[in-house]
């Protein structure tokens, strides 16, 4: 909703409690000169949003993701801020009352030694165990995956004792999303991308202790040498075993398509079902599109993925939300043809989605 003094607002993450009625969404807003973090709460599945005061002062930064643990009142949000110019530091907020009030998280000591800066992009909590992922830089040309963990619902955090390590020869690795089982909160999967020396390819790690220690996935689908791909998001079943990841593949210099991966062993071995077909407009297929987020039911079978696609020319285009549904854990997808949009909306993107355990109610932002 428009708020006085804010020239633009962006929402990057959404999470809800078990019935998907009480929800929290996070992002950033600009006041004409700089971006600051924002949090909205909702008690009607996101139909109406209430701005939450953060007491952030003149803080420059953004919140990228939020999670609210099922069966608790704990919520946590992560992102980054810029305390002294262009270098980013991890930043976040925590709530113990289901998102009604928020306090600042102390991330001052979570970056590894010699890190120049860092950012957090994804977070998952199950009961009291939480995991958050992102990146940190050790030089101006090399970025490495970052993981932190919490055992008290996101109130206090430590750097994961065993950080994700890139494959040999890999550089510029980033983890963008993490998901953990709700019934077994020790099984987690995280996804992102890295440069393998020739191009950008998907990256995945698995954890059996709630994100404290990570090992690389044994098998990832092969990406052609002339193709770059990034996994933006992952979601897992309540057991943590059945997971589906979504992202974007650049198969030429001028065209991108959605990609989906799936696993039945918490991310040890991934497979790549056929990519979802992009919508057609006026009989012509859209050639640019990608997926930013995904949510599935408790079994990991019924799933909805969201993102955006472009239509028009590359230099005169409109960006439109993209939604797919799957009834087989991401093996096949059906595009949602009709999406309600605000009047006069232009260049609209869906960055996040949350559904209840039976997927009868979903909220996207």
Image (cartoon, rainbow, N blue to C red):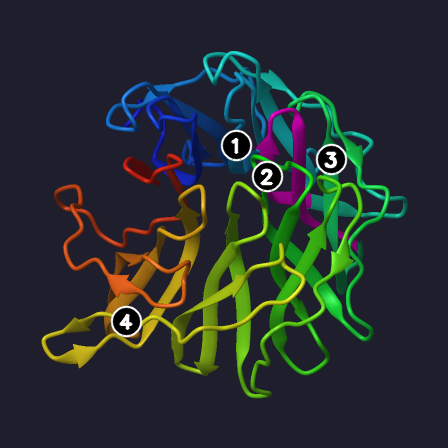
Magenta extent: 119-137
Depth check: 274 or 177 in front?
Answer: 274
Residue 109 visible (yes or no) = yes
Does the magenta run of residues contain 117?
no
What residue is shown with label 3?
Answer: 149
Q: CA distance from mark 1 to mark 4?
A: 29 Å
Q: Residues within 10 Å of mark 4 (few under 14, many from 20)?
A: some
Task: Report which residue position mark 1 lands on.
Answer: 67
Pointer 3 with pointer 1, Cβ within 8 A: no
Which badge, 1 or 2, comes first in the chain's sequence?
Answer: 1
* Residue at horizontal 38 percent and vertical 20 percent from the top: 51
Q: Which mark is residue 278?
A: 4
Q: Is the N terminus in the top left, top right, bottom left or bottom right quadrant?
A: top left
Q: Position of residue 253 (x, y in %)?
A: 45, 83
User: Residue 185: horizontal and vertical position, in percent?
Assistant: 64, 36
Residue 21 appears left or right of 13: left
**Residues at marks 1 and 2, CA–CA distance in whole angstroms:** 6 Å
Sequence-wise, which precedes: disc 4 or disc 3? 3
Tell me, for residue 123, which label it has, or none: 2
- View extreme (right): residue: 113
Quarter location, residue 13: top left
């Amino acid at each position: 909703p428009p708020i006085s003094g804010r020239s633009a607002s962006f929402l990057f993450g959404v999470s809800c409690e078990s019935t998907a009625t009480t929800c929290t969404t996070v992002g950033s807003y600009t006041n004409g000169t700089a971006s600051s973090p924002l949090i909205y709460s909702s008690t009607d599945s996101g139909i109406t949003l209430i701005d939450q005061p953060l007491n952030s002062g003149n803080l420059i930064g953004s919140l990228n993701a939020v999670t609210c643990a099922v069966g608790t009142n704990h919520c946590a949000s992560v992102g980054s801020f810029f305390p002294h110019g262009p270098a980013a530091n991890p930043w976040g907020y925590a709530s113990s009352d289901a998102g009604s009030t928020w306090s600042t998280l102390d991330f001052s000591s979570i970056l590894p030694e010699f890190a120049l800066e860092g950012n957090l992009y994804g977070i998952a909590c199950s009961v009291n165990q939480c995991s958050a992922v992102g990146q940190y830089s050790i030089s101006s040309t090399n970025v490495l995956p970052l993981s932190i963990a919490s055992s008290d619902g996101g109130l206090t955090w430590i750097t994961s004792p065993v950080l994700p390590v890139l494959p040999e020869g890999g550089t510029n690795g980033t983890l963008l999303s993490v998901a953990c089982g709700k019934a077994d909160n020790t099984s987690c999967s995280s996804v992102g991308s890295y440069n393998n020396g020739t191009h950008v390819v998907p990256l995945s790690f698995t954890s059996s202790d709630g994100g404290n220690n990570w090992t690389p996935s044994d098998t990832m689908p092969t990406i052609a040498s002339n193709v770059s791909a990034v996994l933006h998001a992952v979601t897992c079943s309540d057991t943590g075993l059945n997971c589906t990841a979504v992202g974007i593949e650049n198969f030429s210099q001028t065209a991108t398509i959605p990609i989906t991966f799936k696993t039945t062993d918490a991310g040890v071995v991934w497979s790549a079902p056929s990519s979802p077909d992009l919508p057609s407009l006026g009989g012509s297929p859209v050639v640019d599109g990608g997926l930013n987020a995904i949510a599935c039911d408790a079994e990991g079978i019924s799933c909805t993925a969201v993102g955006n696609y472009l239509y028009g020319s590359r230099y005169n285009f409109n960006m439109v939300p993209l939604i797919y549904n799957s009834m087989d854990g991401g093996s096949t997808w059906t595009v949602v043809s009709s999406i309600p949009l605000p009047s006069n909306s232009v260049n609209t993107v869906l960055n996040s989605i949350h559904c209840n355990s039976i997927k009868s109610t979903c909220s996207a932002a």
